[in-house]
Image (cartoon, grey):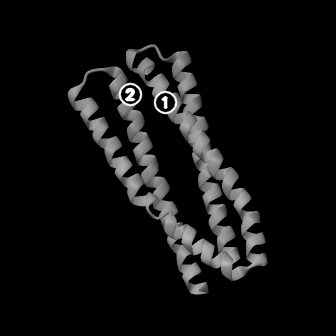
Amino acid sequence: MKLVEYSVQWAKGESFEGMCITIAGILTLICSLLIWKFGITVNAKALLIPAFVLGLLFSTMGSFMLYSNNKRVTEFQNAYQTDSEAFIQNEKKRVEDFQFMYPTSLAISAVCFLITVLAFAYSKNPTFHAIGIVLTVFGVSLIIIDYFSKERAQIYYDHILYNL
């Protein structure tokens, strides 16, 4: 299989991930609307805005991933047909350049968990608890997303190195 076919597979995997994130964002927005409509407790009211913000964040991130990776499929094919060697070198550099994101997102997740623990341990404020809950969901989501993304990136990078 040519590298461009692996490139397209990688981009389609990223698009699928973006679609999942978008759906999670939309579901979170729906949940926040349901909390707004039916939530009568103090904790439910405190969760409304953080959940809504998380839903917007996921919807925006996922939509961007869908758009950019679907667009990238065509760009991959055109770039490979134009100059396959330059395409391979550019992809190698691009994949190497985004590897810093995996440890960074793990650190962000750890900070989210720490803030949640501190919010629940040292505060009785429902707003801080709600923010902590949303930060935990965000942190777990980052770990899950990166778990699959890192695997796909490594497989893709191995194919790039094989084609050099």
Viewed as shown, does residue 108 lie left or right of 63?
left
Residue in the image at 39% along x and 15% along y = 42
Question: What is the number of callouts on the image?
Answer: 2
Of all residues, the one furthest to the top in this rendering is 40
Residue assigned mark 1: 51
Relative to 52, residue 17 above or below: below
Image quadrant occupied by the N terminus:
bottom right
- Residue found at x 24% / y 24%: 123
**Does 114 appear above or below 69?**
above
The mark found on residue 132 in the picture is none
Q: Where is residue 114 in the image (x, y as percent from the top left)?
A: 28, 41
Other residues around mark 1 within 10 Å, as few (<14) / some (14–19) / many (≥20): many
Q: Quadrant of residue 56?
A: top right
- Disc 2 residue type? Ala
Q: In this view, does 69 lie above or below 44?
A: below
Mark 2 packing: few (<14 Cα in 10 Å), some, or many (20+)? many
Where is mark 2, residue-wise? 130
Q: Position of residue 145 (x, y in %)?
A: 49, 54
Q: Where is residue 38 in the image (x, y as percent from the top left)?
A: 52, 17
User: Which of 70/31 is in front?
Assistant: 70
Element at badge 2? helix
Q: Which amino acid does label 1 sit on?
A: Ala
Q: Do the residues labelled 2 and 1 touch (CB within 8 Å)?
A: yes
The part of the image, by quadrant, that contains residue 159 is bottom right
In what element is the residue under mark 1? helix
Q: Position of residue 142 (x, y in %)?
A: 45, 50
